[in-house]
């Protein structure tokens, strides 16, 4: 233990001489000290809190990973021109998601690859936890197992996000390009540990993610036994994320198994949008988006007052980005619905109530309402609806059409729609159509089309046309500054 502490202390002293590798090194935490972080389970849990906290930054799930996938595809277009998403809406070269480095600092003379909130920082927090736990687990074996399970879940989530952004899914490679991302499972505990290394293959990356989630499932308690669920990871959250990963990988039978397991014991519920339980004139689905904890959340990020302030909120929160000042004074409304997205709603779909036309050809989202104040709200990352649609798609792709229709229609009837009778390819299309409408502004549309090798018909307001799957811009570029200091890693094709 002392050796680790001394290594970390040495790292703090030497960090200034190793800035070019800081994108994968732990930065000083204002909430913890090195000694506390390594001395007992409370300290290790503080590092876990840091990992959770990194996920909520606007450069990660606080905004970018939720909104950009809809702009890169066909759901959202630029609303008020604030300079945001201008390039992403037309898939401009290098206008993509940036979670390997810090998107707040675009490449240029003043750019530094140091980032507090990139995915590798989150991963390193988890690696520190996993390296430290064996020394302190005897203090409380059950608690240590729970912490390990949470760390493995967060590491898996972060690596899967990196793989989604920077690589092709296994079996969907273009031109044989199978590079994944740099894999690091050891904690960076000193300057000597900040070595450079090559990228893994995408399959190796997926294998790590699946192994972490499988281990997490065995370690984590059920949601009913997690006091802070869904804001803390439960067994059902790990099962649901593993179902998502299997869906991306094309392992549909396994996806169905994990989705079924998650739904069987989760404390989350499917909201019935056909009723107005409290009699306030709006349906329960509409109302669910102003509850502090969404009733469908299997895993949800909590954002506290100490995490954000009013400046963060008005400049970058989901509430401000998706709304104008109609009821949200000062909100910037950087994105709005595309006409093509709005046309996808069937008559009677209660989800259309979440989209309000505030000006001619300007329809904005009411999912994100800042109900906690200062544009702040919790962020559901895995909802019951998503897992139900994973189950429906997996069943449809493995020949269980009756089961797929049962799951699909359970959602449709709860959204005010008639039951579907589709079969074959039309049934799969129907599931994907529900995913588009149900999960908009939750970070799925572009990745759904990418995982299936689909071309994207771009909105007419952006010039129309089709963004081909084999276009090199489907996967994001690595930052040039990072490439300049790691000659073992090459950029993605044609950048």
Image: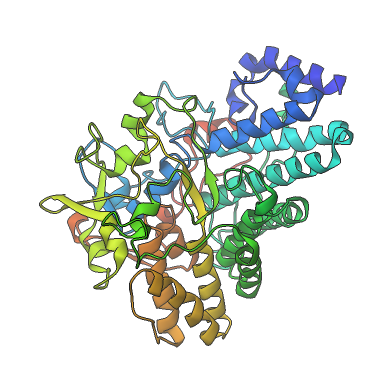
Q: How many marks?
A: 0
Q: From this viewpoint, which residue is outermost toward the left?
A: 360
Q: From this viewpoint, which residue is outermost toward the right?
A: 138
Is residue 307 something one can see in this rendering? yes
Q: Judge from the rendering whether residue 149 lies leftward or rightward of residue 58; answer left or right.
A: right
Q: Position of residue 121 (x, y in %)?
A: 60, 33
Q: Residue 178 is drawn in which quadrant?
A: bottom right
When the figure is inspected, residue 406 is found, relative to residue 18, above or below; the finding is: below
Q: Residue 331 is drawn in which quadrant?
A: top left
Q: Residue 2 is drawn in which quadrant?
A: top right
| Residue at 32% across, 60% down | 283
When the figure is inspected, residue 136 is found, relative to residue 443, above or below; the finding is: above
Q: Position of residue 338 (x, y in %)?
A: 23, 57
Q: Judge from the rendering whether residue 316 lies leftward or rightward of residue 28; answer left or right.
A: left
Q: Quadrant of the N terminus?
A: top right
Q: From this viewpoint, which residue is outermost toward the top?
A: 13
Is residue 457 something one can see in this rendering? no
Q: Position of residue 314 (x, y in %)?
A: 31, 30
| Residue at 51% across, 38% down | 302
User: Could you say which is closer to the camera, residue 350 or residue 1?
Assistant: 350
Specify the color scheme.
Answer: rainbow
User: Could you say which is closer to the camera, residue 92 or residue 150?
Assistant: 150
Q: Judge from the rendering whether residue 363 lies leftward or rightward of residue 61; answer left or right.
A: left
When the figure is inspected, residue 312 is found, relative to residue 431, above or below; the finding is: above
Q: Position of residue 305 (x, y in %)?
A: 46, 27
| Residue at 40% across, 22% down | 109
When the figure is inspected, residue 220 is found, relative to residue 326, above or below; the finding is: below
Q: Judge from the rendering whether residue 117 lies leftward or rightward of residue 185; answer left or right.
A: left
């Amino acid at each position: 233990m002392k050796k680790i502490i001394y290594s970390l202390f040495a790292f703090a002293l030497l960090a200034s001489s190793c800035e070019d590798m800081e994108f994968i090194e732990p930065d000083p935490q204002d909430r913890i000290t090195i000694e506390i972080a390594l001395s007992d389970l409370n300290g290790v849990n503080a590092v876990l809190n840091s990992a959770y906290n990194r996920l909520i930054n606007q450069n990660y799930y606080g905004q970018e990973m939720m909104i950009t996938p809809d702009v890169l595809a066909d759901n959202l277009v630029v609303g008020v021109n604030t300079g945001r998403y201008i390039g992403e809406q037309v898939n401009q070269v290098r206008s993509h998601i940036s979670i390997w480095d810090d998107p707040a600092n675009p490449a240029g003379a003043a750019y530094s690859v140091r980032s507090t909130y990139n995915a590798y920082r989150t991963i390193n927090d988890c690696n520190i936890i996993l390296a430290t736990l064996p020394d302190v687990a005897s203090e409380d074996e059950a608690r240590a197992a729970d912490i390990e399970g949470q760390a493995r879940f967060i590491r898996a989530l972060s690596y899967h996000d990196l793989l989604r952004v920077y690589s092709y899914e296994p079996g969907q490679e273009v031109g044989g390009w199978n590079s994944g991302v740099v894999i690091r499972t050891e904690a960076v505990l000193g300057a000597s540990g900040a070595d450079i290394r090559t990228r893994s293959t995408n399959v190796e990356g997926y294998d790590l993610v699946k192994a972490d989630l499988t281990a997490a499932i065995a370690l984590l308690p059920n949601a009913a036994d997690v006091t802070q669920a869904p804001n803390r990871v439960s067994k059902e959250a790990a099962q649901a994320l593993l179902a998502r990963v299997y869906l991306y990988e094309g392992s549909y039978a396994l996806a169905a198994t994990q989705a079924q397991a998650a739904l069987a014991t989760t404390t989350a519920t499917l909201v019935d949008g056909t009723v107005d339980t409290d009699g306030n004139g709006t349906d329960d689905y509409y109302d669910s988006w102003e509850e502090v904890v969404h009733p469908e959340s299997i895993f949800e990020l909590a954002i506290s007052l100490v995490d954000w302030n009013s400046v963060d909120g008005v400049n970058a929160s989901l509430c401000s980005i998706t709304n104008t000042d109609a009821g949200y004074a000062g909100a910037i409304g950087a994105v709005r619905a595309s006409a093509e997205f709005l046309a996808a709603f069937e008559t009677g779909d209660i989800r259309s109530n979440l989209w309000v036309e505030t000006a001619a050809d300007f329809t904005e989202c009411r999912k994100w309402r800042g109900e906690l104040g200062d544009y702040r709200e919790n962020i559901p990352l895995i909802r019951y609806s998503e897992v139900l649609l994973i189950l429906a798609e997996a069943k449809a792709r493995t020949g269980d059409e009756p089961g797929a229709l049962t799951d699909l229609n359970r959602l449709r009837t709860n959204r005010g729609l008639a039951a579907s009778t589709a079969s074959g390819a039309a049934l799969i299309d129907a599931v994907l159509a529900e995913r588009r409408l149900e999960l908009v502004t939750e970070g799925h549309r572009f990745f759904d089309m990418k995982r299936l090798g689909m071309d994207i018909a771009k909105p007419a307001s952006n010039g129309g046309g089709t963004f081909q799957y084999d276009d090199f811009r489907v996967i994001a570029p690595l930052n040039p500054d990072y490439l300049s200091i790691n000659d073992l890693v090459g950029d993605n094709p044609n950048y």
